Image (cartoon, rainbow, N blue to C red):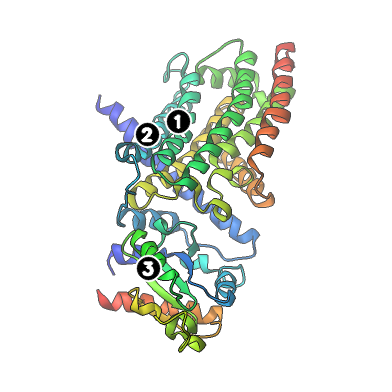
Amino acid sequence: MSLRLKALTKSIWVYHLSTGSCNNCDIEIIDMLTPRFDAERFGITLVGSVRHADAILVTGSLNLKAIPRIKQVYEQAAKPCVVIAIGVCACGQGIFKNGPNCPNPVDSVLPVDIYVPGCPPKPEAMIAGIVKLIEKLKGKK
Amino acid sequence: MIKLFFNFLIFPGFLFTAIAGLAASWIDRKVTARIQWRVGPPWYQPLIDLVKLSIKEITVPRTASKELFFISPMIGLSAVTLVSTLVWLANIGPASKGFSGDIIVAVYLLTLPAIAVILGASASGNPLASLGASREIKMVMAYELPFIISIIVPIIKSHGLLRLGDIINYQAANGPFIASLSGAIAFIVMIFCMQAKLGLVPFDASEAETEIMAGTFIEYSGMLLAIFKLTKAMLIVVLPLFLITLFWQGFGFLSLWKYLILLVVIILIRNTNPRVRIDQAVRFFWGKMTLLSIIAVLLAIKGM
């Protein structure tokens, strides 16, 4: 494994982007970063600014007002940067499938790398998703 | 000439202090994790964070002043490199190295990383960064006053010596200053000022993650952010070393325990305190700490 890939996969700084969710996925993300699950073992920390981020955790059913904003946030991120869709709303719109306010799934706006379904997904599920993402990145090289 | 460059760039200047700083910041993260009942990151985590940041893209905001945005991290890094060389050399050869008045140069150079943060934040053109910069300015004005008054204490006690090596030699002959009452009070004041200079938790209002995101560093990414992180890591080595030099008879390689005690004190203060507001911090430093340091100076004049 090259040093570049090791550095990118061993120190993932996540940025948390809510696009109009019910806050349940957001609470579970915070739960994933608590001492019980200790994501810092793998170098995962939550950062406040998208400029520092290596992974953007998108939650919520993407509503119309949020579309230009999440595009702007993704453009501001320093590349390489991956997008992780957390929760069933961000993965495939969930119960808002036919809603008038959120006609676009997240992956029609951003290049989503991995989907973690659940309403909300458990912290274990998110960690498993990140492990699968790392395996995918390693396989790509 | 080659020896000079070797001193500044490899040992004991940039490279050595950077490695020691990365190790110290790993100890910081690991002990913090153990206090919070976690396992904590592996030993190479600070290094791999830097490597990752340095291979990422550097983004420059459209509203930024570009030259200042790029130069200010270098100002901080070069200042901390110079001051680390100065303080290490004074400890390695107290009789021969250094020049008269290097204690004043060290005080100025220790302020420069904070100035660099302020410059970079105000150049980035972000409202939250300018908020962080204004908080950092207030913090610098707050902690510099008791810091400088406390530095007067070892100068008075050593009868006006202004060279770091001379102060170490004086303490080697007459006992460390920390053993006297005035030295102990000034040392406690200096520990709080050190915490504020490092920007660690009770005094980290300028980069408060939960209220103004990353504050002063909000627009920095890639290599430039890595340089700021490296500057912070090197300061964790240099500032305790400066304190040991002034009050605790200097630092030899057999007395690593002095440094470790100061590091543990920093980590414990960081983990047991909530963040104070900027007005509380200014009141703390200009009130209690300045009063304590003036008392220490008066006691030192009395010879206690």
For discs 2 and 3, the disc positioned in front in the rendered view: 2
Relative to the observer, which residue lies in front, A122 or A117? A117
Q: Residues under labels 3 and 1: Cα distance?
A: 34 Å
Asked if the residue at tag 3 contacts the one at tag 2, i.e. Cβ–Cβ closer than 8 Å, the answer is no
| The disc label shown at residue B112, or none | 1
Asked whether residue B254 appears in the rendered view, the answer is no
State the residue at coordinates (57%, 39%). B259
Give the x, y percent position of residue A37.
57, 73
Label 1 is found on which chain of the structure?
B
Q: Residue furthest front?
A: A100
- Is A17 on the left-hand or right-hand side of B189? left
Label 2 is found on which chain of the structure?
B
Label 3 is found on which chain of the structure?
A
| The disc label shown at residue B170, or none | none
Q: Which residue is mark 3?
A: A9
- Is A82 on the left-hand or right-hand side of A94? left
